[in-house]
Image (spheres, grey):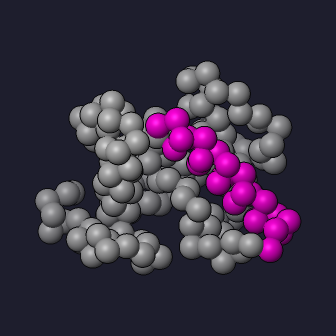
């Protein structure tokens, strides 16, 4: 499960379709309607909010907005509740840049045109997130995570 911290506009077709599907799965997990994924680390930041279903629903709402702009027909009736004006969740700059690099690696192989487009852009957070200082989240497990644990050493601010 990957619930991207990046703005959905950075995602290619498989990425946005996948995050819609994963977001719906996350919503199902948070309602207790599935046994799998209940302790998935991607859900930590939603579980920490005052209303996890509202936050995952709002996350999905913004994926829906981006998808609609591209002509996809996501069904908003599948979103249990949302509020585009809720307080934002914090995401660290380290996490945002880690995900940006992770996505670029995928796009380089999967969609070279989107890769070139995104490479020219500064990473922006999904509208539900507010960027704060900090490293890659401890729940990320990857060989390249160590390089991103302290983005300030890499020159990111």
Q: Residue 48's x, y, as percent? A: 62, 70
Q: Is residue 117 left or right of residue 38?
A: left
Residue depicted at 54% across the width and 59% down the height: 2
Q: Quick check: can you spot residue 127?
A: no
Residue in the image at 38% along x and 62% along y: 95
- Foreground residue among 94 and 107: 107
Vertical comparison of 126 with 140: above or below:
above
Q: Quadrant of the C terminus?
A: bottom left
- Name the foreground residue: 77 vs 119: 119
Question: Is-magenta flag for residue 13?
Answer: yes
Q: Is residue 66 placed above or below 54 in the rendered structure? A: above
How many dots with numbers?
Answer: 0
The image quarter in which residue 64 lies: top right
| Range of residues picked out in magenta | 12-35
Asked if residue 4 lies in the magenta stretch, the reply is no
User: Magenta part mainly helix, strand or loop?
Assistant: helix
One can see residue 138 in this view:
yes
Give the side of residue 11 with respect to residue 28, left or right. left
Q: Which of the pair 28/87 is nearer the observer? A: 28
Residue at image point 64% right, 45% down? 20
When asked about the image quadrant of residue 116, the answer is: top left
Q: Residue at x 33, y 60 (%)?
A: 98
| Percent of width and height locating residue 105 | 32, 52
Spot occupied by residue 81 in the image (x, y as percentages of width and height): 78, 46
> Seen in the image, is 135 located left or right of residue 71?
left
Q: Quadrant of the N terminus?
A: bottom right
Q: Is residue 66 above or below residue 69?
A: below
State the residue lying farthest toward the front.
109
Q: Residue furthest right?
A: 33
Location of residue 103 in the rendering, given as x and y in whole percent from the top left corner: 38, 50
């Amino acid at each position: 499960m990957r619930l991207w911290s990046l703005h959905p506009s950075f995602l290619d077709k498989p990425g946005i379709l996948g995050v819609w599907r994963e977001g719906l799965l996350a919503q199902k997990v948070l309602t207790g309607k599935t046994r799998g994924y209940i302790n998935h680390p991607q859900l930590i930041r939603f579980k920490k909010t005052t209303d996890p279903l509202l936050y995952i629903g709002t996350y999905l709402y913004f994926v829906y907005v981006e998808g609609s702009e591209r002509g996809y027909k996501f069904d908003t009736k599948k979103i249990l509740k949302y509020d585009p004006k809720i307080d934002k969740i914090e995401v660290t700059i380290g996490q945002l840049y880690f995900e940006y690099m992770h996505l670029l690696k995928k796009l380089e192989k999967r969609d070279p045109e989107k890769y070139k487009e995104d490479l020219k852009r500064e990473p922006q957070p999904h509208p539900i997130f507010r960027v704060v200082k900090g490293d890659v989240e401890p729940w990320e497990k990857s060989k390249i995570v160590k390089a991103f644990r302290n983005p300030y050493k890499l020159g990111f601010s």
